[in-house]
Image (cartoon, helix red, strand yellow):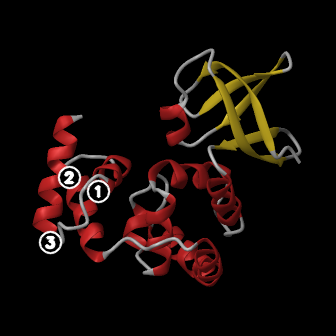
Amino acid sequence: MIASVSGTVTAIGDNHLVVNVGGVGLRIFVPGNVLEDVGGIGRGITLHTHLIVRETELALYGFADEEDRSLFELLLGVSGVGPRVALSILSTLSPELFRSAIMREEPAVLQRVPGIGKKTAERILFQLRDRMDTATSVTGVTLVSDVDADVIELLTGLGFSIVEAQTALQNVPREARSVDERLQMALQYLDQR
């Protein structure tokens, strides 16, 4: 298995990068956060990767950190979830929001991901619920509060992406506790960008 790749970005696609490693261009499918942070063609990059071998193709998937790769591999263990759907989940939801949705059994959060309907969301919840308990206790990830979940829902309802909503909330001081305060501060942050 190819555990990681380091090289120079030579092309950027809708859902992939081409990374030159020792004179060989590798097409690596990546989530949206990697595409946003790549910085352009000619930049150096290191990705934690997962290789999928099929009868007709070899596909390489790359992630900014090992946590994202572990979540990708965990999602591949869910029946009916292939690499494209798993990548879509990681492009749409942050690891914290994904874990929170699993722990709180909120299929509506998963249904925001393109390509995931009600049955698939419920299957993901059912199959990962017990496995996420162990993973979360090991990594010590904090769950998204009910207030923050409400603010994210309101912001996405206003047309912001989940990633934008999460970024805005990370920049809101913890002293602001009510939904109204946190929403107002998040909107101010988004307005300044």
As drawn, the label of residue 178 is: 3
Precedes in sequence: disc 2 or disc 3: 3
Q: Quadrant of residue 166?
A: bottom left
Residue denoted by label 2:
186
Left/right placement of residue 34 relative to residue 1 reads: left
Q: Secondary structure at mark 3?
A: loop
Residue denoted by label 1:
169
Whole-Å distance between the Cαs marked 2 and 3?
12 Å
The residue under the point 43% across, 81% down is 104
Left/right placement of residue 173 relative to residue 98 reads: left
Precedes in sequence: disc 2 or disc 1: 1
Quarter of the image containing the C terminus? Answer: top left
Q: Report the number of discs.
A: 3
Residue 20 is situated, as x and y percent measured from the top left of the image, at: 76, 20
Q: Residues within 10 Å of mark 3 (few under 14, many from 20)?
A: few
Q: Residues within 10 Å of mark 2 (few under 14, many from 20)?
A: many
What amino acid does circle 1 point to?
A: Leu
What amino acid does circle 2 point to?
A: Ala
